[in-house]
Image (cartoon, coloured by chain):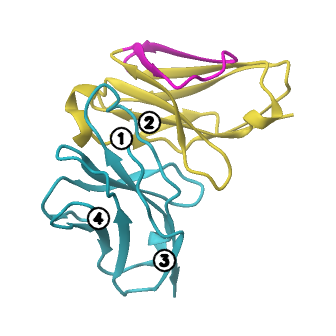
């Protein structure tokens, strides 16, 4: 199983709502990632978790709150988002950061978020 | 990850080879070159990676220049399913090696 799954596929939320995005992998990977991709732009890294601990936060606003409850699961909690946060949110996983620059990442299909 | 330079777009005909170039003039001795592609409405997908010598896998070949300042992704026989954005990424070691820094990529159009 080389799949990264993400739910939901689509999400519409108001600026006062609280919602969560979910990502799951069963490849035994110990590093997981959140990326944000605006339309016609490349993905941009938001967070990296390594062995369930946050290792990189790319200065993401606090209205995005990541959580890694276990090695297979990664959540992104959303609160008080702005319309400009509308984007495709991609989750990825990899074997573990100790593999260094040879390591490859496996991406999910993304959650398309619209903030009204 | 350092910046790479790719053409904005390229076109190919089905069943013909495609050569996608990438410049990475600031590459250091331990940096790897990775290629990912993103098909429409999907997440990025790993294609291939290499350090110094040419690499082949079932999807593509990667030809790395002798001075390592450029590389070429080769799709031997393009199909319509290969139409995607192709990203060339220079990956460094160190504390930031968890990061994939995507450039603008090359939009590949394949004509039937």
Question: What's the residue at 60%, 55% (across, down)?
Answer: B41
Q: Nearer the viewer, mark 4 or mark 3?
A: 4
| C-beta proximity under 8 Å, tags 4 and 3 | no
Residue numbers of the magenta segment = A52-71
Please, what secondary structure does the residue beneath circle 2 have?
strand
Residue A55 is covered by the magenta coloring? yes
Residue at image mark 2: A92
Circle 2 packing at 10 Å, graded few (<14), some (14-19), many (20+), is: many
Circle 1 packing at 10 Å, graded few (<14), some (14-19), many (20+), is: many
Nearer to the camera, A18 or A101: A101
Residue at image mark 4: B70
How many numbered callouts? 4
Q: Where A53 falls versus A25 (above or below)?
A: above
Instruction: Give the main secondary structure, helix, strand or loop, of the magenta stretch.
Output: strand
Whether residue B59 is visible, yes or no, is: no
| C-beta proximity under 8 Å, tags 1 and 3 | no
Quarter that holds the C terminus of chain A: top right
Same chain letter for marks 2 and 1:
yes
Quarter that holds the N terminus of chain A: top left
């Amino acid at each position: 199983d080389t799949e990264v799954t993400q739910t939901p596929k689509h999400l519409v939320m108001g600026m006062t709502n609280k919602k969560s995005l979910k990502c799951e992998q069963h490849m035994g990977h110990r590093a997981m990632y959140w990326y944000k991709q605006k339309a016609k732009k490349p993905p941009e890294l938001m967070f990296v978790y390594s062995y369930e601990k946050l290792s990189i936060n790319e200065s993401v606003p606090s209205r995005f709150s990541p959580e890694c409850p276990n090695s297979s699961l990664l959540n992104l909690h959303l609160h008080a988002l702005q319309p400009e946060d509308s984007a495709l949110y991609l989750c990825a996983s990899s074997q573990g950061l100790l593999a260094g620059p040879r390591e490859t990442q496996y991406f999910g299909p993304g959650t398309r978020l619209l903030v009204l | 990850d350092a910046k790479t330079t790719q053409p904005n777009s390229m076109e190919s005909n089905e069943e013909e080879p495609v050569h996608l170039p990438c410049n990475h003039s600031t590459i250091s001795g331990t940096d790897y070159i990775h290629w990912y592609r993103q098909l429409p409405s999907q997440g990025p997908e790993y294609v291939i990676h290499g350090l110094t010598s040419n690499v082949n896998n079932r999807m593509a070949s990667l030809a790395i220049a002798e001075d390592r300042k450029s590389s070429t992704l080769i799709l031997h026989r393009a199909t319509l399913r290969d139409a995607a954005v192709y990203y060339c990424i220079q990956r460094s070691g160190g504390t930031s090696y968890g990061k994939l820094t995507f450039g603008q990529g090359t939009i590949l159009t394949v004509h039937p």
